[in-house]
């Protein structure tokens, strides 16, 4: 569903610019826009709209350079989400009361069922839905292969907070790490991968007080969300993402050990761990460099991370 042309850029992606889009999406979906709040506003703008018990998550995509490609990707996401549900992969689900995606002023908009969260996500709980995704058959929907080289190169080129010297150092680091990635892709079977599984991209499925109290011990207690970048690649990428988030963002070691036990694998025991760890962290740092405005607190945190890449693998990172 399309609503008007608009020359949108990622630099204009702010709460002030996305709130009018939210209001238009609410009108299309017949939702109350008077009671909305921002859940997240970084890679995408994520709002909670409506009033209990009829609340909906409205997700507004950050515009890319090609709006037509954005829309094609969004249609593929809708197809993939529906396919995952049919194959019992625990994920969030789209609102089914209107055709999706919406396309409003150059932005892709999707609407999702809301799962209220009353307790922090644990690392262990991510294991079951992630394992289900990795074990799912390959879908008939075309998905591009995971390509960290292109993503990192583009982020370095677009990052306004990076100096020429930093660009050179980061590109050199990428060149040193890519042979290990090429070897991994040659030696492993491509599976469905989330590409960014972590605590903020996983939700508790159960919402009642009674079920929530025992949620972590129930069957399939958690579901994966933020499915935009689900694609084909080595499962090691996802497992490394979990390890990095656990180590860099202060999650308990015992919780990560429980994740490894539940999933059935500890990526730290894999011989390719050091190189893939460094490549995955480079991807995280350069992505955040691209999204951060000069002089912002986010930019200062990215600079701190860059300074520590070669010196402290256990440096604690602040959530952006």
Image: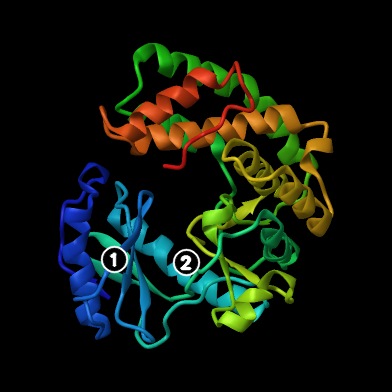
Q: Nearer the viewer, residue 87 or 144?
A: 87
**Is 43 placed above or below 53 here?**
above
Quarter holding the N terminus is: bottom left
Q: Is residue 16 above or below residue 240?
A: below
Left or right: where 176 falls relative to 225: right
- Asked where in the image residue 174 lies, by quadrant, the reply is top right
State the image coordinates of residue 272 (x, y, percent, origin top left): 77, 32
The answer to whether residue 105 is visible is: no
The part of the image, by quadrant, that contains residue 107 is: bottom left
Mark whose residue sits in front, 1 or 2? 1
The first of marks 1 and 2 along the sequence is: 1
Per the rendering, the mark at residue 315 is none
Residue 233 in view: yes
Whole-percent x and y of residue 184?
A: 74, 37
For disc 1, the marked residue is 37
Q: Which residue is mark 2?
A: 76
For label 2, the crowd category at 10 Å Cα-Cα, with few meaning under 14, some 14 to 19 and many 20 or more, is: some
The reply, left or right, for residue 167 in relation to residue 29 is right
Look at the image and name its color scheme.
rainbow
Residue at (53% x, 58% y) in the render: 201
């Amino acid at each position: 569903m399309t609503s008007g042309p608009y020359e949108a850029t990622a630099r204009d992606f702010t709460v002030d610019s996305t709130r009018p889009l939210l209001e238009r999406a609410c009108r299309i979906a017949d939702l109350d826009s008077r009671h909305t709040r921002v859940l997240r506003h970084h890679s995408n703008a994520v709002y909670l709209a409506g009033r209990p018990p009829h609340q909906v998550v409205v997700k507004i995509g950050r515009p890319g350079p090609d709006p037509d490609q954005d829309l094609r990707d969004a249609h593929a996401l809708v197809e993939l989400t529906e396919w995952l549900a049919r194959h019992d992969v625990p994920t969030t689900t789209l609102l089914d009361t209107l055709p999706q995606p919406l396309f409003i002023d150059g932005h892709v908009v999707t609407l999702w069922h809301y799962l209220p969260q009353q307790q922090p996500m644990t690392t262990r709980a991510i294991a079951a839905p992630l394992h289900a995704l990795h074990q799912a058959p390959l879908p008939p929907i075309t998905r591009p292969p995971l390509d960290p080289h292109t993503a990192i190169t583009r982020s370095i080129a677009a990052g306004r907070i990076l100096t020429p010297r930093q660009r050179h150092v980061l590109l050199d680091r990428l060149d040193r790490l890519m042979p290990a990635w090429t070897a991994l892709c040659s030696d492993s079977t491509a599976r469905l991968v989330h590409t960014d599984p972590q605590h903020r991209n996983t939700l508790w499925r159960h919402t009642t007080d009674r079920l929530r109290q025992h949620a972590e011990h129930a069957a399939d207690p958690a579901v994966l969300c933020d499915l935009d970048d689900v694609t084909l690649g080595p499962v090691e990428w996802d497992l490394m993402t979990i390890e990095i988030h656990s180590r860099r963002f202060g999650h308990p070691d015992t919780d990560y050990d429980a994740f490894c036990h539940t999933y059935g694998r500890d990526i730290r025991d894999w011989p390719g761990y050091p190189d893939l760890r460094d490549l995955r962290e480079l991807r995280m740092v350069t992505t955040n460099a691209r999204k951060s405005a000069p002089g912002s607190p986010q930019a200062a945190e990215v600079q701190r991370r860059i300074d520590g890449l070669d010196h402290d693998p256990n440096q604690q990172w602040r959530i952006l």
